[in-house]
Image (spheres, rainbow, N blue to C red):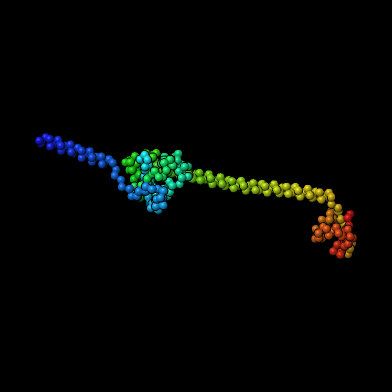
Amino acid sequence: MLIALYFLLSINCSIEDNLELTLMSTPLLTPVLVYSDLKSEKSSILRDNKGKSGIYRWTNKVNGKIYIGSSVDLSKRLRNYFNVSYLSDLKDIMIIYKALLAHGFANFKLEILEYCNPSELIKKEQYYIDQLKPEYNILKVAGSSLGVKRSVETIAKIKAGALSRSEEALAKNREHLKILNASQKHKEHLANLNASLEHISKTAKPVCVINMDNGENIEYRSITQAANFYDVHPETIRRCIKNNKLLLNKYQITYK
């Protein structure tokens, strides 16, 4: 009887020990915040976590796979997740981005596991990575994951810079084309003007202007030149020649 009782007690102790070990090996997490409907809770997510440092977890409701991340400003970090263009550009670098695009936000749950000081982020994130073994985390060392984040940000800045430079280059090219077009039009205008002047030079008739007060005689290459000198219209000069009238009641004008 005593042997049987001892045997039962031994089995009971063994079961309790195993249960205790199992509970110790399985982390019991109580997230600070849980967001199950990401589409309708986006504003709350960004507002609740503004300026806060901490650890977050994405959970795929379809296959149970998770991703552990951290940020000194959770709101800014999580805002990127809701930017589809951002995810699309960098989906080949971050598996979680590709998963969110493939399964959709409706099939994911977001949890804020805990808030902590920025100085504790790496230690806390490493703890959760070790305990939860997230499938979507490419790197399993919390410190090195910061390197990935810097690379992502760098790539985004490079793309933005390239776009900016492209816009600047296009603007400069457009301005350069305007200058070239203007220059070309200016050249064409000068060419036409020179041709006109050459034609006028060949067809123009020199005129003589005699000052009737003192007898001074001045010769001009054309009616236009004389008109410019006396500040009158060329047609006025022609009428004076045709009707044999004095210009300004003083000058007699004749063709040479």
Query: Which residue is rendered at x = 56% and y = 45% of the image?
Result: 166
Residue closer to the observer: 143 or 125: 125
* Quarter in which the N terminus is drawn: top left
Tell me where residue 179 appears, x and y as whole percent.
65, 48
> Does residue 164 sit above or below 232 in this rendering?
above
Query: Which residue is rendered at x = 58% and y = 45% of the image?
Result: 169
Q: Is residue 254 left or right of residue 52?
A: right
For the question of whether residue 141 can be seen, the reply is no
Q: How many marks?
A: 0
Q: Is residue 241 left or right of residue 150?
A: right
> Does residue 229 sit above or below 114 in this rendering?
below
* Quarter in which the C terminus is drawn: bottom right
Tell me where residue 184 appears, x and y as whole percent.
69, 46
Tell me where residue 39 appears, x and y as whole percent.
41, 48
Q: Is residue 133 left or right of residue 79?
A: left
Tell me where residue 118 appears, x and y as whole percent.
37, 49
Residue closer to the observer: 147 or 49: 49
**Residue at the limit of the structure toward the left, as seen here:** 1
Query: Which residue is rendered at x = 29% and y = 43% of the image?
Result: 27
Query: Which residue is rendered at x = 89% and y = 63% of the image?
Result: 212
Residue closer to the observer: 124 or 58: 58
For the question of whether residue 39 can be seen, the reply is yes
